[in-house]
Image: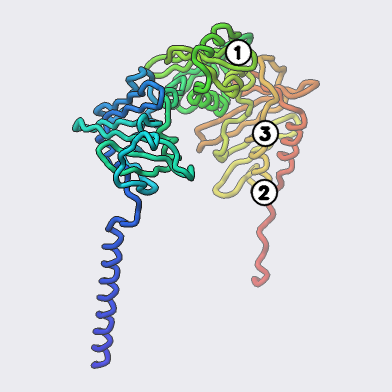
Amino acid sequence: MKRLLIAALVLAGLGGAIWYSEKQEAAKTAQPDTKAPPKILALKEEDVKQIDLERAGEAPTVMVKDDSGKWTMTSPALPADVIAIASLSGLAASIPSDHVVDDNLTDLPAYGLDPAVVSLKLTMKDGKVNHLRIGGETPDKSSVYASVDGDKHLYAMSSQNRDTFNKSARDLREKHLLSFDPAQLSRVELDVVGKPPLEFSKAGDSWQILKPRPLRADGLQVDELVRQLKEAEMDISADDKQAATAFASGKPHSTARVTTPAGALSLEVRKSGDDYYAHSSALPGAFKVTPALGTAVNKTLDDFQNKKLFDFAFDEPSKVHYKSKDDDKTFEKAGTNWLSNGRTVDSVGVQSVIDKLRELSAKSVDDVKPATSEIEITVVSKEGKQTEVVTFAKTATDYLARRGTEPGTYHVAPDVMETLRQAVTGVQEAAPPAKDAKKK
C-alpha cells in the first residue's frame, strides 16, 4: 500500500511538471517574436476606406471602398478589379519590413522617397491618412527603401512587395469583358461569319440546341464556350486607341451573346491580320484579346452536337434489349445477377455490352431519313424512369441511327456496330457455382 501511495505521488508530480512546462511554452508562443523585423504599417484592413496610389510621373489612381466592402475606381473612372485591389489593400495594411536601415531618417530624396517611386495614401475610417513611400533599391538590390510619414524609421522592404504596389490604373481595372454567373444563364448564342447561327437553351443542368434546328447538345462543349466567354480578358499591354482603330477596321469574325436574369450581354470579335479584337456590350471601347478566344468562338454546329447514341451515361441500366433479324436478346438485372430468358448469364459479358452502348458514338449527325430499321436497341435506366430506344438502318457505307422520334440522324461506322453485335452474341450463360469438394 505504501509503495502504491509513493508511486501515485511521483506520477502526480510528473503530471504537474509537464503541465507547467506546457503552460510556459504556450506563454512563449503567445508573445511576439522580439527578433522579428518590425512592420512598416500595422492597420486594420477593414478600416481602410480609400487608397490613393501614385507612381512617379503618373496621375494618382484613386480607389474607394463602400460600406458593403466593395472597391470602386473613381480616378480614372474605370471598372475595378475588386480582387486585385482587395489584395493590394490587405498587404498595405500590414507590410513587413526586411529590417530597419536607420532610426532617424532625415534625407528622403537620398533614398528615392521624395519624390517616391511609388506612393500610397491610405485613408482610414476615422479620416486619418497613412502615407507610405516606396523608393529606390538598396545597394545589394535585394530590397527597396520605404518610409511612412510621421515615422522616423527608414525601412528596407521586399522588392516583391514593391512590385505588388507598383500598379497602374490599367493593372487594377476590371479586365474581364463580360461579367455573369454561368449557373444563371438561360441562353447562349453564337453567330460566326459565314456559318449558320447557333443558339442553345438551358433546362436544369442540360443544354439543348435550338438553332439551326432542335438537337441534343454536347453539354461539355457548350460549358467550355461559356467558360471562354466568362474568362475573356482584354490585353492591357495593348494601347486602347490602337485597339479601337484595329477593331474598327478589322474583319468581322463572330458575335457571342449570353442571356442572364438581368438581361443579355454580347461580345463582338473582329480580326485584323493575325490579331483579334473585341467589343463588349458591358464596356465602352474595344480591346485586343487572345487568339485562344478567337479560336473558342470559331465553332460550327458539328462541334456542339451530342454524338452519343445513349444518355444513360454512368447510370447502370436495369434492362437491355437488342433486336435484329438474326438476334433477339434481352438482359435484365435481378439483384446482383443478370438474366436472359430467365437464365443467369455472365455479368462480365453483359457489362461489356453496356460499356459499348455507353460509348456508342456517331461520326456525324444530319437530317437524312433512314430506310426501315434493321436493328433496335432499348436501354432502361434510372430505376426504370428512363427508356431509350435507338433504331439502326444499314446503308452501303454505314448505319443510320435515330433516337425514338427525336430529330437528327446519326451516322455510325459499320465496324462499331459489328463490335457491338459480337459483344451481344458473346454473352454466355453463367457457369454453375463450383461444388464444395469437402461435401459428399
Colour setting: rainbow
Q: Amino acid at mark 3?
A: Tyr
Label 3 sits on residue: 322
State the image quarter where residue 133 is shown. top left
Q: Which mark is residue 166?
A: none
Dot 3: element? strand
Label 2 sits on residue: 346
User: Which of pointers 1 and 2 lies earlier in the amino acid sequence?
Assistant: 1
Mark nearest the camera among 1 and 2 is: 1
Q: Amino acid at mark 2?
A: Asp
User: Which of pointers 2 and 3 lies earlier in the amino acid sequence?
Assistant: 3
Residue drawn at 72 percent across, 30 percent down: 324
Label 1 sits on residue: 271
Q: Amino acid at mark 1?
A: Lys
User: Which of pointers 1 and 3 lies earlier in the amino acid sequence?
Assistant: 1
Residue farthest toward the bottom in the current orientation of the protein = 2
Residue 51 in picture, x, y percent from top left: 31, 29
